[in-house]
Amino acid sequence: MDIKRVAIDAVNETIVMTVVHMDYKGQVAKRINEKMPLATVKGFRKGAVPKDLVEKQYGKAIKQEEVKKVVDLALERFVQSERLNLLGTPLPKVNEDFNWDAEELVFEYEIGLVPSFELDLEAKNDIVKYIVTADDKLIDGQVARIQKQFGTPIPQDVVVADSDITGTFSNEAEGINNATTIALAIFKDKVTADKFIGKKVGDVVTVNTKGLFEDDHQLMDYLKVGHDNVHGLAVDVDFTIEAINGAELAELNQELFDKLFGAGTVASLEDLKAKIKEDAESQFAQQADQKLLADVQEFLIENTKFDLPSEFLIKWLQTVGEKQLTPEEAIVEYARSERGLRFQLIEGKAMATSNIQITFEDLKAFTTNAIKGQMAQFGQTNPTDEEVQGIVARVLSNQEEVKRLSDQVVAAKLLELFKEKANPTTKEVTYEEFIAASYGE
C-alpha cells in the first residue's frame, strides 16, 4: 500500500491511499473459504457449492468489506504516525466512477488541520478588571428586604404604597406568563406605580415593558423574558392581582441573625451590614471574574489571526450528529460555532505554552470547595470532612460531572493566567456601575 499527504494550503490536505491486490487478497481468500460451507446456490446442496460460484456470488461484497477494513486501519495508523492534529475527522472523497476491478484502488480523504499561530497573551489591550463594591444604598436595601421577608404578612384589601403584590404578568403573543411578587418601588416611574394604588384582588393592571424598570434586565426576573429580547422590548403586559399583603417588619434581633447566618456569626446591625457587604462582594467578584474572562476571550479572538479549514468543516458538520444537516444548515451551524472553535484553539495553545495541567488533586480540591459552598447555602456551615469527602467521591464517580468540573478547573486556571499576563486595568465600581459596564447601558 502507498499512502501520502497532498497539501492544498496550510490547513487543508488530502490523504491519498493506493491499495493493491496484495493488501487484501489473503483475507478475502480466508473469508471465501469460511463462506463455502454456508453458501447456498440454487441447484447445489448447502456446503457443496463450487468455489468459483461462491466467489462469483459473494466475492465482490467480501472484497469491499476487507478493503474497507484495510483502508480504515491504515488511515488511523497514518494519522497517528504523522502526528496529524485534525479538526473534525477525515472525509472520504466521493468517486461515482470508482472501479472495484482495477489493479490499484485509490482512495482519497479530505482533512482539516489545526492551524499554526502565535499567541500573545501580553498584547496591549484596554481590558478592565472590575472590583465591585457594595455601597450603602445596596446594603440598606438588603437590610430592608430581610426585615420584610422575615416579617409577618398582613393581608390587605387594596394596594397601598408599601404593599407586596402577588400576581401574574402575561402577554400571550409574546409568550409571557410568569407568576411573581412585586413591590411598587421596583417600577422606574411613579406613574406606573400609581396605576396599582387602590386596586383589589382580581383586578388587572396593564403596563408597558419599555422603561418599566430602572434596569431592563429586571424583565428577565419578573417576566422571564430572555436576555436577547430585553433590549428595546415595548409591549403591553397585563398584571392580574392575586394577593395583596403588607408586612409587620421583622425585628433585627439575635434570633433573626442566628436564623440567617448561624449561631453567633452576627450580633448587631453593624455586623449584619458587614456580613451583607462581605457576601455581596464575594458574589460580585465571581461576576467580575466572569466578565473579565469573557472580555479576554473576545480580545484574543479578535486579535489572534489564523485561518480555519472552513469549507472542510462545513462539509464535516453535515456528516456528524444524529440528524444529518443540509449544506445550508451546516453553514448556519458553522457560523454559530466558529468563534467558540477559535477560542477553544486559543485556550489549548495558552495551556500548552504555559504548561497548565489538571491533576486529580486539582479536581478534588475544586470539587471539595464547591460542595462546601453548596452545603453552606443550605445552612450546613460546619460539615465534617467525612461528610464532604463522601459527597466528593460520589460526584467524581460520575464521568459527566468529572467533565463538567474539569472544564471549570480549566477556566479557573486560565482566568488566573489571563489576570497575570493580560495585565488588565483595575477599576473599582458600584454594582450599578458594573451592570452598566457589562451591558453597555
Image (cartoon, rainbow, N blue to C red):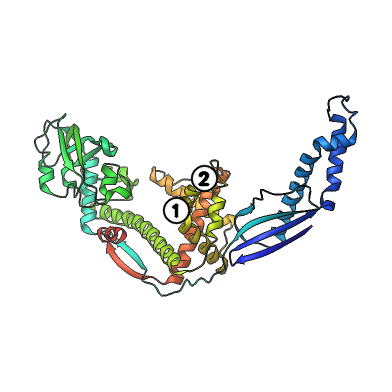
Front residue (pair 210, 136):
210
Give the side of residue 429 with respect to residue 102, left or right. left
184 up-or-down from 78: above or below:
above
- Mark 2 element type: loop
Q: Which quadrant of the rendered structure holds the N terminus?
A: bottom right
Query: Can residue 82 be seen in this snapshot?
Result: no
Front residue (pair 303, 362):
303
Question: What's the residue type where badge 2 is placed?
Answer: Leu
Residue farthest to the front, as pictured: 97
Please report the residue visible at 37 percent of the width from the left and 60 percent of the height from the top: 291
Please report the residue visible at 43 percent of the width from the left and 46 percent of the height from the top: 374
In the picture, residue 166 is in which quadrant?
Answer: top left
Residue 199 % position (x, y): 11, 34
Question: What's the residue type where badge 1 is placed?
Answer: Arg
Please report the residue visible at 47 percent of the width from the left and 50 percent of the height from the top: 333
Please report the residue visible at 10 percent of the width from the left and 46 percent of the height from the top: 191
Give the side of residue 386 with respect to residue 95, left or right. left
Q: Nearer the viewer, mark 1 or mark 2?
A: 2
> Circle 1 is placed at which residue position?
336
Front residue (pair 215, 46):
46
113 up-or-down from 240: above or below:
below
Neighbour tally class for label 2: few under 14, some 14-19, many 20 plus, Cα within 10 Å: some
Q: Which quadrant of the rendered structure holds the C terminus?
A: bottom left
Query: Can residue 136 be seen in this snapshot?
Result: yes
Neighbour tally class for label 1: few under 14, some 14-19, many 20 plus, Cα within 10 Å: few
Spatial CA distance of label 1 from label 2 is: 14 Å
Residue 319 % position (x, y): 57, 47
- Mark 1 element type: helix
> Circle 2 is placed at which residue position?
325
82 up-or-down from 140: above or below:
below
Residue 275 % position (x, y): 30, 54
